[in-house]
Image (cartoon, coloured by chain):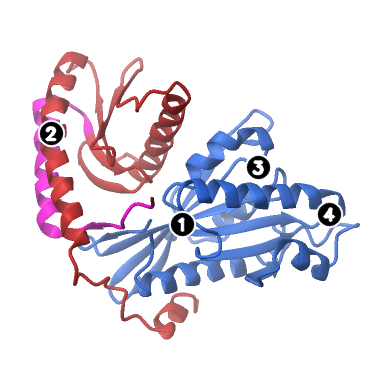
Chain colours: A blue, B red
Amino acid sequence: MSFINYLSREINCKIVYYGPGLCGKTTNLQYIYNKTNPEAKGKMISLATETERTLFFDFLPLSLGEIRGFRTRFHLYTVPGQVFYDASRKLILKGVDGVVFVADSQIDRMDANVESLENLRTNLAEQGYSLDKLPYVVQYNKRDLPSVATLEEMRALLNPSQNVDFEAVATTGVGVFDTLKAVAKLVLTELRRGGGG
Amino acid sequence: MVNPQMVMYEEEFNQIQAVVDRLVKEANAKVVFIVDKNGQLIAQSGDIENLDSTSLASLTAGNIAATGGMAKLLRENEFATQFHEGEKANIHIQLVGKRVILVVIFDARSSLGLVRLRVKKASEELNSIFEGLLRKVQEPGRDSPFAEITDEDIDNLFND
């Protein structure tokens, strides 16, 4: 649910990166953080375990510039990917304006991808959202690793309705900003339609 | 059901800011801020110069969300009040009207009793302001300022 402030002439939107454990959600945010000008970003917050697995969420506030005199600010969140953190994942989805599903391209992670995508649909439905109506982008991450599924296989499995999608290597930044820009554009387009929550 | 969009107009913002400014004084607080449940900062007052209020807002909302999740598991409606006691700073967190969160940061110059008392009164005032705001947002004919943006406007954002 976006927040329009007429006084400070700001629009705030929330984007959530979803996906199975270790698929690279936090790595996406870290890359964005490292490559963004200091004046356009706030502090990145990671609520993680001692072994650097996301415990609750990562948070990165970004300022993307002005549209018609309104500053556009995006709050990027990740969810904890591990299956047993489902209660926390539900909380992060509250008030979401756009979703990025980060899939792990390795063949032996396909079941985990499918399970996570199902979980995303279920958790969105619980809040009254539908993935088919939300601004939504799919990212096939870890394309640089050996034994990855083909793009066609992944599309058939995870993106049959042909939403915008990108191949990515989040560790080196391939596809990271393409993904972010695509979802941000969809969110702004949705706002124009009078949606945004 | 999905919440309606949060919009802030000058009139309501000034009313909210007045409540927050007064609360800082009356509760002897260091900082007072208001966040919506999704983590967006709405208003702040007090000694905010060296405060990362954006991060604090997001973490406060996460905190309230987590506590709300616990309440649900215990079949409680909501834990509307939280208090965190530190060595120097204390944080009092109050849910207002199920929609926004009122946060008071205070030190030894104040006390929990005083903060609670002042927060109660401020919450009532804030609740009625936000209820009015919500009604205003839902009035027909209030178009989003983004209704007329073009593809070009959006593309221009990303031409860096």
Callout in the foreground (2, 1): 2
Magenta region, residue range: B2-31
- Which residue was labeled with disc 2? B124
Given this view, does label 1 or label 4 mark the residue nearer the observer? Answer: 4
Q: Nearer the viewer, residue A193 or B75?
A: B75
State left or right for residue B101 relative to residue B110. right
Report the side of A14 relative to B50 (left or right).
right
Which sits earlier in the primary sequence, circle 1 or circle 3? 1
Whether labels 2 and 1 belong to a single chain: the reply is no
- Badge 4 is on which residue? A106
What chain does mark 3 sit on? A
Of callouts 3 and 4, the N-terminal one: 3
Quarter of the figure with the N terminus of chain A: bottom left
Residue A37, visible in the rendered structure:
yes
Q: How many marks?
A: 4
Residue type highlighted by circle 3: Gly
Quarter of the figure with residue B153: bottom left
Query: What distance separates the C-alpha of mark 4 from that of mark 2?
Result: 54 Å
Locate residue A72, reporting x and y percent: 37, 65
Separation (CA) of disc 1 from disc 3: 28 Å
